[in-house]
Amino acid sequence: MKKLLFIISALVMMLFAFTGCGANKDQAADNSSSGSTEKTVLKIGATPVPHAEILEQVKDDLAKEGIDLQIQEFNDYVQPNMALNDKELDANFFQHTPYLENFDAEHNMTLVSAAGIHIEPMGLYSHKIKKLDELKNDAQIAIPNDPTNGGRALLLLQQANLIKLKDGVGVKATVQDIVDNPKNIKIQEIEAAQLPRSLDDVDAAVINTNFAVQASLTPTKDALVIEDVSSPYANIIAVRKGDENRPEIKKLITALQSEKIKKFIEDKYKGAIIPAF
C-alpha cells in the first residue's frame, strides 16, 4: 500500500512539473510574440480627401517600421488643430503653413510644420455657368470664411480679373480690401467644408481642392479658373513644437515623401493635387 501511494505521489509531482514547464513555455512564447508585434501608436487627424486617402497608402509601410498608424477623420479645419494641441493626436494633415500660423496666433498655440507633402490648387466652380465670361453683373460668389483661405480665394478672383485688391495685401486680403469690382460681385463668406453645397445657391464658389474632390469635382476639368501650379501653399504634416524630431514622425514623413506616394498622387489625382517634394 505504501509503495502504491509512493508511486501515485511521484506521478502527480511529475504531472505538475510537466504542466508547469508547458505553462512556462507558453508564457515565454506569448511574451516573445507580444514583443515582436508590439508597435508604437501614431494618431494622426486628417480630412477625408485627399489626406486620409494618402495616409492609407503608408499604413502597411509604417507597420513594417513598428508603427501603428491610426487615422482619425475630420470634416472641418478647427478640431484637428484643437485635438493636436490637446495631445489627443500626435500630428495632423489637412492645412498649409499660412493657415497654421494664423491659427496659432489666434489660439495662442505653438503648432508647427514638420514637412510639406502636396499642393492643392484652389479653384472657382459653378453649377450655373460653363465659362468665366458668362458670369453676370451682381453675381454671388462664395469664398471660405477663414482668414487665410478667404484671402487666398480673393487673390484667385483677382487672378481671374473679376476684382482688384489693394496693393500688397497678399493672403491677408479681406473683402474690405477690394478696390475695384467692375461686375459688382457679391461676396459671401461660408465655412470651407460647406462650399460645395453652396453651388446651387450662388453663381460660383471658390473651393479648396480637398472639398472639391470630395464633392466629385475635378479641378483640372470643372474649375472655371484654378491657381497656378506654382502655388506656395503646400499641405503639411503639423505637430506640436518639439515633436518634429520624434522618430515615428520622421518615419511618417519619409513614407509620405517617397516615390510610391508621389506616383500615387500623380496617378490618382491627375494634376489636381501636386507633390510638394
Image: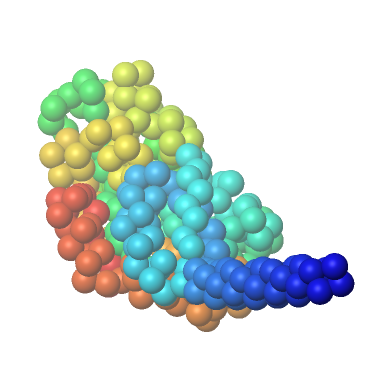
Q: Residue 63: percent from the left, percent from the top?
A: 41, 67
Quarter of the image for the N terminus: give it: bottom right
Q: Nearer the viewer, residue 76 or 259?
A: 259
Q: Is residue 11 left or right of residue 78?
A: right
Point 48% across, 39% down: residue: 75
Residue under the image location 79 percent in, 69 percent down: 4
Image location (x, y in percent) of residue 49: 35, 45
Q: In the rendered image, which quarter is residue 194 located in?
A: top left
> Residue 31 vs residue 262: left or right?
right
Can residue 54 be seen by looking at this rendering? yes
Q: Position of residue 251 (x, y in %)?
A: 42, 75
Q: Quadrant of the C terminus?
A: bottom left
Q: Where 189 sits versus 240, above or below? A: above
The picture quadrant where one finds residue 93 is bottom left
Q: Is residue 22 above or below residue 92?
A: below
Residue extending farthest right: 2
Q: Residue at 43% x, 46% y: name it.
A: 47
Q: Say if 110 sits above or below 119 in the image.
A: below
**Residue at 20% over, 42% down:** 219
